[in-house]
């Protein structure tokens, strides 16, 4: 039994990236499309017969689309044509699955193919073959903007907070850092000046930020300068 898989991902520029998946190593994302290929070959010198069978076991949120019928997540489907294989012949089946947002919470998609072949008529021994392509599902992260000591700032400064970013980002993605609506605000005799965004206490000095493996909060800091009233 052999099983291979590739995944297709539509990139930001509209092109499709296709890569081979490695069992227990590769990582996929929501909206990726996984293509599985399963082959069962009779490498012996005796034809398979009744009772010999192949199965594909699938674990995910959605449904695996296959030419022998669809397989709901958490269930298995039969691989047809195994019981009639002659020595040296094989059967190959193709399956497709589109990764769903719900798979992110599970964190894993498992697809295992197996074959159970009796060693001969009236013999209890069974030869079993197994092949798998199990992959991790990457979870995206969010971005939030806030001001330090937000509740203690004047309303006129609070309203300078930029519109929140509702996009989702994966580790390594580039986030365009949003600017406040204004960087300076004078209220009466007090001038508030924006002193930049900070992440985990470190000032962000570039206009873009490389996403890590967690949600990010940009904390904006303000300085204020009191001007003496003219007399």
Image (cartoon, grey):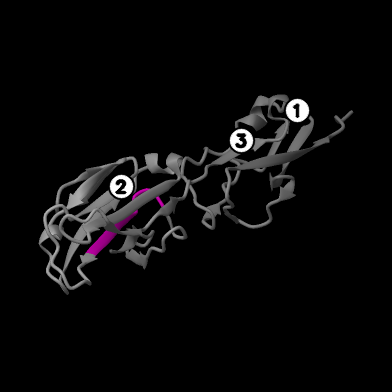
Q: Which of the 4 image quadrants contains residue 130?
A: bottom left
Q: Secondary structure at mark 1?
A: loop
In this view, the residue in front, 63 or 86, is 86
Residue 34 part of the magenta-drawn span: yes
**In the image, what residue occupies the spot 28% across and 55% down?**
114
**In the image, what residue occupies the spot 41% across and 54% down?**
135
The picture places residue 207, in percent across and down from the top left corner, at: 60, 56
Query: Where is 26 relative to 58, above or below?
Result: below
The quarter of the rendered structure image containing the N terminus is: bottom left
The extreme right residue here reads 231
Query: Where is 147 relative to 57, above or below?
Result: above
**Cα–Cα span, label 2 and label 3:** 50 Å
Q: Secondary structure at mark 2?
A: strand
The extreme front residue here reads 122
Tell me: 73 left or right of 179.
Answer: left
- The residue identified by callout 3 is 160
- The residue identified by callout 1 is 188
**In the image, what residue occupies the spot 38% across and 63% down?**
21
Q: Which of the 4 image quadrants contains residue 101?
A: top left
* Residue 91 is at least partly visible in this image: yes
Tell me: 121 left or right of 64.
Answer: left
In this view, the residue in front, 154 or 196, is 196
Q: Main secondary structure of the magenta part?
A: strand
Pick whichever of labels 3 and 1 is earlier in the sequence: 3
The segment highlighted magenta reads 29-39
**Cα–Cα span, label 3 and label 1:** 17 Å
- Mark closer to the observer (2, 3): 2
- The residue identified by callout 2 is 58
- The label shown at residue 86 is none
Pick whichever of labels 2 and 1 is earlier in the sequence: 2
The picture places residue 178, in percent across and down from the top left corner, at: 57, 47
Q: Residues within 10 Å of mark 1 (few under 14, many from 20)?
A: few
């Amino acid at each position: 039994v052999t099983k291979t898989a590739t995944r297709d991902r539509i990139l930001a520029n509209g092109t499709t990236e296709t890569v081979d998946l490695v069992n227990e190593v590769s990582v996929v994302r929501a909206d990726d499309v996984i293509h599985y290929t399963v082959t069962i070959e009779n490498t012996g010198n005796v034809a398979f017969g009744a009772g010999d069978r192949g199965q594909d076991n699938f674990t995910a949120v959605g449904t695996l689309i296959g030419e022998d019928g669809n397989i709901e997540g958490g269930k298995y489907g039969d691989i047809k044509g195994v019981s009639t294989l002659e020595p040296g012949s094989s059967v190959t089946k193709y399956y497709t699955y589109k990764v769903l947002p719900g798979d992110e919470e599970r964190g894993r998609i498992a697809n295992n193919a197996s074959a159970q072949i009796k060693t001969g008529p009236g013999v209890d021994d069974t030869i079993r073959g197994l092949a798998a392509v199990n992959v991790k599902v990457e979870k995206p992260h969010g971005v939030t903007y806030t001001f330090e000591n937000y509740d203690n700032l004047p309303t006129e400064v609070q309203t300078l907070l930029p519109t929140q970013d509702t996009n989702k980002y994966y580790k390594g993605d580039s986030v365009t850092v949003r600017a406040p609506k204004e960087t300076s605000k004078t209220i009466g005799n007090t001038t508030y000046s924006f002193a930049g965004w900070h992440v985990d206490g470190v000032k962000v000095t570039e206009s873009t930020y490389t996403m890590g493996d967690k949600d990010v909060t940009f904390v904006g800091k303000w300085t204020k300068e009191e001007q003496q009233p003219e007399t």
